[in-house]
Image (cartoon, rainbow, N blue to C red):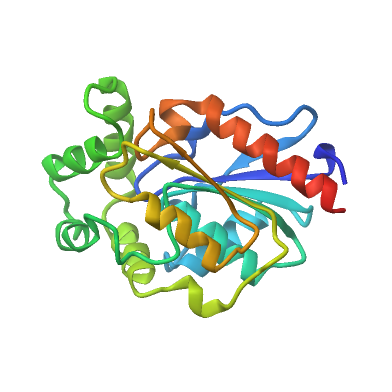
Amino acid sequence: MTAEDLTTVFIPGTHVSPDVFADVPVPLGSSAVGAAWMENAQPCTLLNAAAHAVGLAEGAPCVLVGHSTGGAIAATAAFAFPDQVKGLVLIDSGPDMRGHATVAEMLDELADPVDDEVLIRHARRNVPHGSPEEWIDAMVAYARRVGGAPAVEVLADQAATDLRTRGTLPRLPVEVLHGGLDPKRSPDDAAAWRDVFPAARVVVDQSVGHTPPLEDPVIVGAALERLVERVRSAT
């Protein structure tokens, strides 16, 4: 299998547009698509979002790049669609939300109508202090457009889910990327993916926070390149 045979599906986190992946380089010759799952998965559960994301590959073998909640969606898809999902890049996520610093607060605050002050505060936690204001503005605009209801639905589902209970996929190639400056998730959350995907390789980059696709898209592209090479070598 070559890169040309694979479709890359980018799956963003909660209240984050697929545009967050716009500058991530993809392997030469491969195709890529972003999953606007908050707009298309109804009800907005991990499984429905996973089905939407994999469906964008139109039956082709795919690799999934999931950020934050998108990581849980990507992992859910690996179990639900094993014949189509050939590998994962999981970014600043984890198999459960026990270590997530803000999920309880988010569930309390995101009932519609959501104040802009709440959306701004949540957006600022997604990137390191001093990040460009246009990043914050874009996240707030997207969150305002999709509303709080789908966020509450998916976060409640994610909070109730421990992906370890699904078993393991020992042969699935998985690259885990974690930002050392992430205030929401810890390196332990990243390492815990090995409980689900024993072949996962974990990289912690101390220069980025919760949203590496925006902060340093090149390192996300490098993780994707490593994954595609592993998928190619395994076939």
In the image: residue 40, left or right of residue 227: left
Q: Is residue 184 above or below residue 18?
A: below
* Residue 19 in view here: yes
Please give the name of the residue rendered at 54% of the width and 62% of the height, measured from the top-left corner. Answer: 194
For the point 15% across and 45% down, which residue is it?
118
Q: Quadrant of residue 212?
A: top left
Q: Is residue 54 above or below residue 136?
A: below
Q: Which corner quadrant of the image does residue 225 belong to?
A: top right
Task: Give how far across and how far down residue 56 sits, in percent.
Answer: 66, 51
As displayed, is residue 92 above or below residue 149? above
Residue 155 location (% of width, % of height): 33, 63
Image coordinates of residue 117 in percent, x first then y, are: 11, 40
Q: Give me the residue at 35% from left, 40% from top.
A: 210
Examine the rendering and report whether any part of residue 57 can be seen: no
Percent coordinates x, y for residue 73 in the rendering: 51, 60
Residue nearest the observer in this picture, 73 or 171: 171
- 94 vs 212: above or below: below
Q: Who is closer to the viewer here, 86 or 57? A: 86
Left or right side of 45 for 110:
left
Residue at point 27% right, 28% down?
137
Total marks in image: 0
